[in-house]
Amino acid sequence: MKDRRRISTILVMLLLFVAAAPMNAGAATSGSSTLRVDLLKYDPYPAEIGSYVDVWIKVENFASGSAEDVSIKIEPEYPFSLDSEKNAIKNFGILPPDRAAIHEYRLYVDDGAKAGSGSFDILYRASDDFTWQKTTFDIKVGSTTFNSKGTVALSNLVSSPEVFMPGDEGSVSFTLTNTAQQSTITIDGESFDTYARVQSATLVGTEMITVTSQPYEGKGVLGPGDFVQVTYNIDISDSIEDGTYFLDLVMIGNSHSFNNNWMVPVVVDSSAVRVIPSVPLVLENGKADLEFDVANIHPNELSSVLVKMEADGVEFLPQEYFVGSMDPDELFTIEIEAQAEDPEATGEVNLTIYTEYRNGLNEHQDTLGTRVLKLEQIEEDNNNVVIVLLLAGAIIVGAAYYMYRKKGLRISMES
């Protein structure tokens, strides 16, 4: 009996172990899936044949808990090779939630490589208990060295709309110009042409501003004074705060010494249309002509500006007042007829003012809060009627007296 019990106990333990094994394997995959790896950048761009290229890899933990022992491993393919095999694995240790770590690898591009693209794999895992996950990245291979000495400058920066509001979509455009004035230049007795090459131009967004356009890739050369206009579409977050934000514009030029990094400003301002009463908000005997000043306090023009009012038991004419386009700091006065449904009503009602307008192609609707609209009954003033009647009576009495005197004088003369 004891042997049977012992065997039964062993079988139960084995069954529990077998049942737990798939769960652990699933946990390993799940734990690694909470990590994400990205290729931040590589330098030079493109990677040069017969030279080293530095590659920056970012690993990020987007889980709710910490990753206890994060590691990454690089496995390059031809034409790339690692500078040293001992540098293949990088251990970061503990990586808290919503945190990232960055590591730089150094790869050699084979002398016999051809211009085009090459790839390498990045393996990553949360700890030794988890299986490796793999992501493949491609980088360009070629030569960026040219003898041209043209210099590219950034100019004519234009935002559309000029000033963004939270939640807006729009664009940022600019001109890249070869500033050379002549076709050749002599340096240390050696003659060079002044063509300029824009191999690529990348606009990098921020946490609150997303660049939705692909990077520009140049396919030709710019002669002295020539230019190319580049436009990028951007999305502004609804939760962004007012201010000036700077996007990084990274341009790869003739060679490494001709690369540029510019700061492209984007201005965000949530101020818009204000509607201010210019006469008391009072309905006398159920009606009034109300006046309001409509002001555009946004830094650039707003179009399709419309004002609408609502109050319980009150009708407004027109129901929607269309103002149209308004320049910044422009003031426009509107008059709206208000009439109570019950002409004898008294008291106070809430008046809500709504506005609609466009900033560029972006439509906006705002509620400008609530104001108090008073309904009053005013007695008619009868003094004027009394005065008119008295004047009329005085005129009649005077006329009668005049006629009486005239008739009496005529009788006296006849006698």
Image: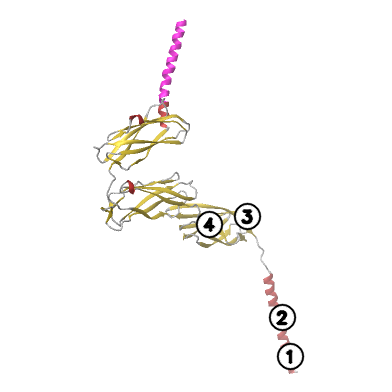
Rounded to the nearest angstrom, the CA distance separating label 4 from label 2 is 62 Å
Residue 247 at x, y percent in the picture: 42, 48
Q: Which mark is residue 315?
A: none
The nearer-to-camera label among 3 and 4 is 4
State the extent of the magenta-drawn residues as a range: 1-26
Of circles 1 and 3, the one toward us is: 3
Compute the Cα span from label 3 to label 4: 23 Å
Q: Is residue 412 covered in magenta? A: no
How far apart, in angstroms, are the residues tagged by discs 1 and 4? 77 Å
Callout 4 secondary element: strand
Left or right of 408: which side holds 346?
A: left
Depth check: give the residue in front, 195 or 297: 195
Q: Amino acid at mark 2?
A: Val
Residue under label 4, please give it. 274
Say which amino acid is labelled 4. Arg
Mark 3 secondary-structure assignment: strand
Residue assigned mark 2: 397
